[in-house]
Amino acid sequence: MVLEKLGGSLKNTLSKIAKSMFVDERLINELVKDIQRALLQADVNVKLVFELTKQIKERALNEKAPSGVTQKEYLVKIVYEELVKFLGGEKNEIEVNKKPFKIMMVGLFGSGKTTTISKLIKYYANRGHKVCTVGLDVHRPAAPEQLKQLSDSLNVPCFIKKGEKDALKIYKEFEKELEKFDMILVDTAGRDALSEDLVEEIKDLNNYIKPDEKLLVLSADIGQAAQKQAQSFHDSCGVTGVVVTKLDGTAKGGGALSACAVTGAPVKFIGIGEKPEDLEIFNPKGFVGRILGMGDIEALLDKAKEAMDMESAEDLGKKLLKGDFNFLDLYEQMQAMSKMGPLSKVVDMIPGLGGANIPKDMLDGQEGKLKKWKIIMQSCTKEELEDPSLLSRTRIDRIAKGAGVKVSEVRELLKQYKKSKKLMKMMKGSDDPNKLMKKLKGKVPKGF
């Protein structure tokens, strides 16, 4: 999970609110200290942490819950809202409004810039854009070839010129051909923000190319140094946004995310893995919802749209929230979720399940079960798929024999189906994080 340690700490903090008899100053002080500790451990700047928790404390002590909301629920809402504001508030989505749309990538050595370009290729190609790449990293010999290999693997043209050391000259040579594309992703040299010659090069490229977006790639493990680096790059080329990479690893990440927010260079994407599909638009509301265990249904459906056509994705969303589905629907969801990445990442986005503290080894085991359950469902008749309540002992015996599995495994699938259906009914109509959290508390089926 993204920022798993921070998420675990904050979930524990919120559980204290849920278990408390009432909200008083003692609880608020304890809550503030827990949040401070969690954020400092996530490498967030001390000054920023105290500014945030001061605001939470002031609101918690002075604001009264509106009608129909308990003070405990309102306290959770305050924490949620202040964390969202702390990480930038609204999401800053890139609007592709012209052709060709030029994105220039800048960053330090080893920040994951070239890998991020491959993710952007996948992201925009999946949305119907004709994409190409240009390799202008002329200082690292292997860089142009690496970019070409990544581009070729994703079936997009890559423009490089081996041996040429003048980055601007390379761009000018291919300029006419680049006009044919919807989007141009420009790779520049990895650099130290304090290296004057490379800063000068990026200024020249920026002045000539006039990119529509200038994205700074920062690794999550850079910590609080992110603020200084973001400011330095911003001074040299006017960075319009940041991509924070490696948020899936052991990096604390909080420093990079929060530092960018205060520099005025908003985080636009986050990298959550090594694969080309492991890139998400950074949405502070959904991100905070996920680390607090409230889910991120918007990110879930965005992943679904990448894995299937728009109509199927919308249908999946309706079924997830409808709570009235059969084996056929469950099978379709399994197929879709298998395309959306590891189950552990998908579960974090589902409201309620992100806060259920499901052990990782259980999720890993569940991945294997999904494959076996698909075989079992393929051994069912159409009638049984449409109405699983028909599964009697004799039918279960027949299905187990046909699928080459144990009877107990068929029963386990049936049990899982009933639990999933119950969970989805509980979620029905709950789009508010606080109400959903209250509704799901202590009710998530065991073993899921």
Image (spheres, rainbow, N blue to C red):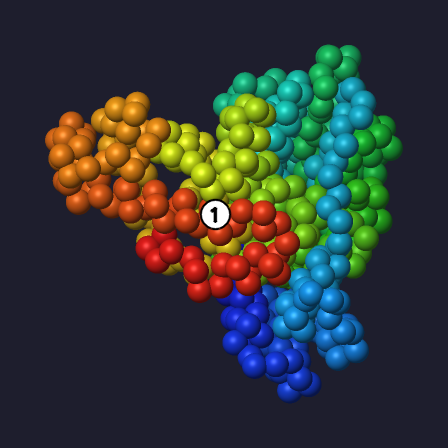
**Residue 44, above or below 282:** below
Look at 42% across and 57% down and name the residue there: 444
State left or right for residue 29 relative to residue 418. Answer: right
Q: Position of residue 72 (x, y in %)?
A: 63, 72
What is the count of numbered marks? 1
Q: Is residue 12 left or right of residue 365?
A: right
> Could you say which is closer to the camera, residue 96 or residue 355?
355
Q: Which residue is mark 1?
A: 425
Comparing 238 with 284, the one in front is: 284
* Res. 326 visible in picture: yes
Q: Position of residue 21 (x, y in %)?
A: 56, 81
Q: Nearer the viewer, residue 407 or 102?
A: 407
The crowd level at tag 1 (other Cα within 10 Å; few <14, some 14-19, many 20+) is some
Q: Who's the residue at 87% across and 33% down the image?
A: 207
| Spot occupied by residue 224 in the image (x, y as percentages of width and height) | 67, 63
Q: Quadrant of residue 251?
A: bottom right
Q: In the rendered image of this protein, does residue 263 appear above or below residue 319?
A: below
Q: Residue furthest bottom?
A: 26
The quadrant where residue 83 appears: bottom right
**Residue 149 visible here:** no
Where residue 232 appears, x then y in whole percent? 79, 52
Identify the residue at horizontal 75%, vertical 54% (top origin): 88
Mark 1 lies on a secondary structure that is helix
Q: Residue at x 39, y 46 (%)?
A: 420
Disc 1 marks a residue whose amino acid type is Lys
